[in-house]
Image: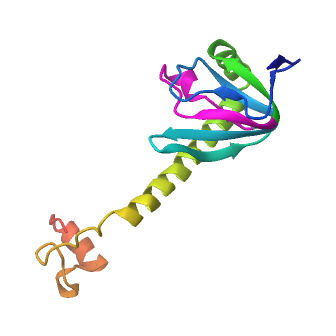
Amino acid sequence: MSEGVLGKLYADGELIVRQGEVGNCMYVVQSGKLEVLREEHDGSVRIGVMEVGEFFGEMSIFEHEVRSASVRALGEARVMSIDKRTFLRRMEEDPPLAFNLLTTMAHRVRRLTGEVASLRLKTAPPAPRPSGEERRTGHERRGGRERRAAAGKGERG
């Protein structure tokens, strides 16, 4: 690994972070591509590929936990590390940067939630249907006008 003007240059296959290690900074991809891998009991699983402008490792800025995945270079790649102090200073100097970071993190959570739901649908038994006592038939349901009228008389509907 050689030191660059901004960030460090990693050779093809070189690890940037290792799953299970404690982290204290996040990273931004400046050039090249990176592979994100999750080590499981039966081998490693590719979670994704990161490209220029993307960031990773941000969870270590917010919590003092071990890395949840390994990241390695796919070909030569330049990656800049950002420690917590630098990160906080940049957030003060450029509040829209914080908003963009949170937006990206929200997109990741939404995507991962969808993936978890999809996996559970494939492996879980169907959800139980309500029993006859819990289901209401059409004539037992009140229409909007009936609910409003009942609410006006102090009833709950």
Decide which of 21, 145 is in the foreground and name it: 21
| Extreme residue toward the left, this view | 133
Q: Look at the image and tell me whether residue 113 can be seen.
A: yes
| Extreme residue toward the front, this view | 42
The quadrant of the rendering that contains the C terminus is bottom left
Decide which of 103, 125 is in the foreground and name it: 125
Where residue 101 sits: x, y (%)?
65, 35
Where residue 142 sits: x, y (%)?
22, 79
Residue 155 lies in quadrant? bottom left
Decide which of 126, 36 is in the foreground and name it: 36
Q: By what rule are the colours in the image chosen?
A: rainbow
| Extreme residue toward the right, this view | 5
Is residue 70 shown in magenta?
Answer: yes
Q: Residue at x 17, y 65 (%)?
A: 156
The quadrant of the rendering that contains the N terminus is top right
Where residue 123 sits: x, y (%)?
37, 63
Is residue 133 shown in magenta?
Answer: no
Q: Look at the image and tell me whether residue 95 can be seen.
A: no
Q: Residue at x 73, y 25 (%)?
A: 94
Could you tell whether 44 is left or right of 129 in the image? Answer: right
Where residue 37 sits: x, y (%)?
60, 40
Could you tell whether 102 is left or right of 139 in the image? Answer: right
Could you tell whether 112 is left or right of 9 in the image? Answer: left
| Extreme residue toward the top, this view | 85
* The magenta segment: 54-75
Q: Residue at x 87, y 19 (%)?
A: 4
Q: Residue at x 60, y 28 (%)?
A: 58
